[in-house]
Image: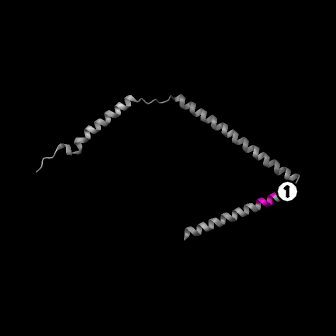
Amino acid sequence: MKNKDPRDSKEYWKKPIVEKIQNTTFQADQKQSVDVPEREWFEDLVRREQKKHRQQLWKDLMLLWAIALIIFTGLTVSVFLLPVFFILVQVAVLFVFCFLYCQEKKRVTEHEQYTTT
């Protein structure tokens, strides 16, 4: 029967490697200190982001209201001053929606046929 060399076992190499990794990690932690910002820095960051988002919200709302006002004004003028134009616009919009609905229905039907076969 052969005598086994203790260096062939995993346990022989495991302990020195683990110790070496732990020492190296400890030394790296000592050399590179991690600076964690103060709570006030995070709170200030949150306040700035909230202010930026609030300003963007107001800008978007003003744009929405401006576009809605223009559309409403156009519709009001067309109803009272040019009723024929208003009716033509309504008919054109109806045809466009019908056309888009038919196209979508056709696309869905073709997709269902493709997936079922």
Q: Residue at x 31, y 37 (%)?
A: 21
Name the magenta segment's main secondary structure: helix
Q: Residue at x 87, y 56 (%)?
A: 83
Q: Residue 100, located in which quarter of the rendered image?
A: bottom right
Q: How many numbered discs sit on the rendered protein?
A: 1
- Is 90 one of the magenta-colored residues? yes
Residue furthest left as drawn = 1
Q: Residue at x 12, y 49 (%)?
A: 2
Q: Quadrant of the C terminus?
A: bottom right
Model colouring: one colour
Q: Position of residue 53 (x, y in %)?
A: 63, 38
Per the rendered image, the range of residues in magenta is 89-93
Q: Is residue 21 left or right of residue 84?
A: left
- Is 8 one of the magenta-colored residues? no
On screen, residue 92 above or below 8: below
Q: Position of residue 73 (x, y in %)?
A: 82, 47
**Mark 1, secondary structure of its residue:** helix
On screen, residue 6 above or below 109: above
Q: Disc 1 residue type?
A: Phe
On screen, residue 79 above or below 24: below
Q: Is residue 34 left or right of residue 23?
A: right
Front residue of 68/10: it is 10
Residue under circle 1? 85
Q: Position of residue 57 (x, y in %)?
A: 67, 40
Front residue of 70/3: it is 3
